[in-house]
Amino acid sequence: MLTSGKAVKVTLYLSDGAKHHGVPVYASILDFLFHSGIAGATVIKGVAGFGAKHRLHSAHILEISDHLPIQLEFIETREKVEAILPELEKKAGSGIIELQETTVIVPERSS
């Protein structure tokens, strides 16, 4: 369980068209994070974007709408992030991984 204090925010920039063994890369990574005990993660699908090849991908262009940007984020302790980072790099394929130092506040939960 994540507690208040110093943490690392991890953001992965992926394409929803990217697949690994027929499974979307973001789904494979989300499953990996879940089974690795990460506190929580969110996947956000963009409506438009472009990458290093400067090809615009948009939900309005049907023939390339399967290449929309996907952003997957989670916040975890530095130790957990460092432990899973090598496998995360393998699973991200041609995606980009961004790490940011952050501070989180986890409110006390009343029973």
Image: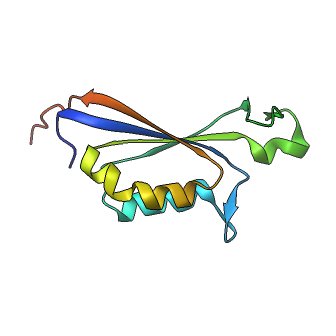
The image shows a total of numbered marks equal to 0
When the figure is inspected, residue 107 is found, relative to residue 43, above or below; the finding is above
When the figure is inspected, residue 26 is found, relative to residue 72, above or below; the finding is below
Residue 63 falls left or right of residue 93? right
Quarter of the figure with the C terminus: top left
Is 28 in front, or is 45?
Answer: 28
Name which quarter of the figure residue 18 lies in: bottom right
Residue 62 locus on image (x, y percent): 88, 41
Residue 61 locus on image (x, y percent): 88, 36
Is 40 in front, or is 9?
Answer: 9
Residue 8 falls left or right of residue 50? left
Residue depicted at x 28% and y 52%: 80
Q: Is residue 15 visible?
A: yes
Residue depicted at x 10% and y 37%: 110
Is 7 in front, or is 35?
Answer: 7
Residue 53 locus on image (x, y percent): 80, 37
When the figure is inspected, residue 54 is found, relative to residue 79, above or below; the finding is above
Residue depicted at x 17% and y 31%: 107
Residue depicted at x 51% and y 55%: 89
| Residue that extends furthest to the bottom in the rendered view of this protein | 21
Residue 6 falls left or right of residue 29? left
